[in-house]
Image (spheres, coloured by chain):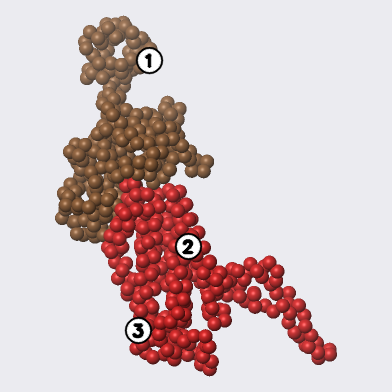
């Protein structure tokens, strides 16, 4: 898949602190790319650099093939919408005027489709109301509307569901999925609520202490976090023909360890082991979530087993 | 640049700033005129200045050079400070409007607010002078135009300085505190400098034994290079005009205001191009 946003060897230092370390990322066109990391991992800094609010210490990024070193990057930014940390909206202006102002920022002269945009984020009825009187959820949705002005190719959303109630989270998810599906907008999104992110993202990057630990697609992630049984035996090799013979999905993790992904009972595993002449040392259920997967990844990086 | 200007114009209208400018200026002009009239009545009670008429108008204009910068700081806070504080400036930077264009558009509208305030004040003061006859004649002459241009230059210098301050601070309250403190600080500094410069070279005292008057060198006298530097600083200050004889406008004061405009804009360019927005 072609990359809409490509980041190469990006570094960011604040004094002696290395906030981003050789970040390399490829965001495929049309993807919902989830950026997963703890507080202070560097997610917001990375997004601020991509949106032009901060400058990298070294390294480059390109949007639609235009490098950040190229003067045309300013024109390409017109095809990008963003919310960094919280929606930047004028509280003394109405929702309609906030969106109109962003149209003017983009050099647009026709404002005919502002009502449609407000309808998309479910704010049509509140169009004339001052944004300062909005609830947090409404402000977030207005922020999305402002970010969507000019039908951008890519949306950069930093913690867009932070502080939202469950209904607000569902509403935001539906809006983002709709934007991605109907407008084919690529979305780079970060969130602490990993369970929610797992309902949206098609791709993931895990970031810790400014380093990208891993990037993978949602299919790959599903493969890795799917329900499995970890079997510890005296020897793995004699078991493999038995599993193959019964079409059991498995993955060898070591000389004495194998993960079984098929839904089979412990007694069935024990009988197969007996037939193969190997001793079963232990069987443990493994039902990892995105959160667990991320924590394991971080623990591995920190050298904690 | 045109996007930045159109955006700033839209925001300028929607913030209601023109209304604030109109109301604040009209209200302030009453106080300025009243202050100037009282000052002229008390100061020139016995001796009318030889050099010009329109004393009340001239003094009002000089007083505006002190008052309008206060209003300018408030306008800059409403227009620029709010944009930086609420991070709405991000929407412009992130959509590819050049940072310098954003800065200049804000500067233009801050200048418009300040200039409008000055003009409204001047018009109101002329109207009051006609409605409530003052000691001197009221007419537009070359002296008034000269003073008006000087006051405009000083206001412009302060507006460029305040725009820089509000772009520099991410919090508009820091910006307004620094801006408002700057004005009395400059006035106090000017007064301190003139007091230092007015120290006599020597002073007389009476000898207690002989009863004769003797002279002694004043240790507080500022001389040499220090005197030259302090004189330059004093004359370059916009507030020196109040304190010099006949309120003559110093060339250094004009140069100082011009230098503030150039340096503030240059520093503004550096600040805005290097600043990292949160």
Find chain B in the image and tell me its colour. Answer: red
Residue A56 in view here? yes
Label 3 to label 2: alpha-carbon separation? 31 Å
Q: Label 2 crowding class (10 Å Cα cut-off): few <14, some 14-19, many 20+?
A: many
B241 to A140, vertically: above or below:
below
Q: Secondary structure at mark 1?
A: loop
Q: Chain of mark 3?
A: B
Q: Chain of mark 1?
A: A
Q: Which chain, by letter, is brown?
A: A
Q: Label 1 crowding class (10 Å Cα cut-off): few <14, some 14-19, many 20+?
A: few
Residue under pointer 3:
B127
The answer to whether residue A299 is left or right of residue B22 is right
Q: x, y percentage for residue A181? A: 19, 36
Determine which of the numbered discs, if any, sits on residue A254 in the image: 1
Task: Give whichever of B270, B261 is nearer the camera.
Answer: B261
Task: Give whichever of A245, B200 is nearer the camera.
Answer: B200
From this viewpoint, which residue is outermost toward the right?
Answer: B210
Q: x, y percentage for residue B67? A: 44, 74
Determine which of the numbered discs, if any, sits on residue B261 in the image: 2
Q: x, y percentage for residue A202? A: 26, 32
Question: How many labels were placed on the picture?
Answer: 3
Name the residue at 58% across, 71% down: B234
Work out which quarter of the rendered image holds the N terminus of chain A and state it.
top left
* Label 3 vs label 1, nearer the camera: 3
Name the residue at 78% across, 88% down: B213
The answer to whether residue B31 is left or right of residue A270 is right
Q: Earlier in the sequence, mark 3 or mark 2?
A: 3
């Amino acid at each position: 898949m072609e990359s809409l946003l490509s980041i190469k060897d990006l570094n960011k230092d604040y004094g002696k602190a290395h906030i981003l370390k050789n970040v390399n990322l490829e965001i495929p066109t049309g993807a919902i790319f989830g950026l997963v990391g703890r507080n202070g991992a560097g997610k917001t800094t990375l997004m601020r650099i991509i949106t032009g609010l901060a400058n990298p210490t070294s390294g480059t990024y390109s949007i639609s093939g235009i490098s950040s070193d190229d003067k045309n990057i300013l024109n390409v930014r017109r095809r990008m919408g963003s919310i960094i940390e919280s929606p930047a909206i004028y509280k003394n202006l109405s929702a309609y005027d906030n969106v109109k102002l962003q149209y003017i920022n983009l050099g647009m002269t026709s404002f005919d489709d502002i009502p449609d945009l407000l309808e998309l984020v479910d704010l049509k009825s509140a169009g004339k109301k001052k944004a300062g009187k909005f609830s947090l959820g409404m402000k977030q949705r207005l922020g999305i509307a402002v970010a969507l002005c000019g039908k951008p190719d890519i949306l950069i959303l930093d913690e867009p569901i932070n502080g939202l109630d469950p209904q607000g989270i569902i509403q935001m998810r539906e809006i983002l999925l709709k934007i991605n599906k109907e407008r084919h907008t690529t979305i780079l999104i970060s969130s602490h609520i990993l369970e929610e992110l797992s309902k949206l993202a098609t791709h993931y990057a895990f970031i810790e202490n400014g380093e990208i630990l891993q990037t993978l697609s949602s299919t790959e992630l599903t493969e890795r976090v799917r329900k499995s049984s970890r079997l510890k035996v005296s020897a793995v090799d004699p078991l493999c023909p038995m599993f193959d013979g019964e079409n059991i999905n498995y993955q060898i993790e070591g000389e004495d360890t194998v993960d079984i992904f098929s839904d089979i009972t412990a007694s069935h595993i024990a009988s197969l082991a007996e037939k193969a002449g190997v001793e079963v040392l232990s069987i443990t259920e493994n039902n990892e979530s995105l959160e667990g997967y991320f924590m394991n990844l971080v623990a591995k990086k920190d050298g904690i087993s | 640049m045109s996007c930045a200007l159109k955006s700033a114009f839209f925001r300028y209208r929607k913030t209601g700033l023109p209304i604030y400018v109109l109301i604040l200026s009209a209200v302030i002009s009453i106080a300025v005129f009243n202050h100037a009239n009282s000052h002229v009545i008390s100061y020139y009670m016995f001796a009318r200045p030889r050099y010009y008429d329109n004393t009340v108008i001239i003094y009002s204009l000089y007083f505006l050079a002190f008052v309008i910068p206060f209003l300018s700081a408030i306008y800059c806070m409403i227009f620029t400070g709010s944009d930086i504080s609420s991070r709405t400036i991000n929407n412009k930077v992130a959509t590819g409007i050049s940072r310098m264009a954003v800065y200049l558009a804000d500067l233009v509208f801050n200048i418009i607010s300040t200039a409008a305030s000055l003009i409204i004040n001047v018009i109101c003061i002329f109207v009051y002078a006609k409605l409530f006859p003052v000691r001197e004649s009221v007419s537009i002459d070359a002296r008034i135009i000269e003073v008006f241009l000087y006051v405009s230059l000083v206001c412009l210098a302060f507006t460029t300085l305040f725009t820089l301050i509000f772009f520099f601070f991410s919090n508009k309250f820091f910006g307004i505190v620094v801006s408002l403190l700057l004005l009395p600080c400059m006035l106090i500094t000017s007064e301190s400098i003139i007091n230092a410069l007015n120290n006599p070279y020597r002073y007389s005292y009476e000898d207690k034994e002989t009863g004769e008057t003797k002279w002694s060198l004043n240790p507080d006298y500022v001389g040499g290079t220090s005197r030259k530097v302090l004189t330059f600083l004093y004359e370059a200050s916009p507030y020196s005009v109040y304190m010099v004889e006949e309120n003559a406008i110093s060339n250094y004061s004009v140069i100082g205001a011009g230098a503030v405009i150039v340096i503030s804009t240059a520093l503004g360019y550096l600040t805005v191009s290097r600043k990292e927005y949160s």
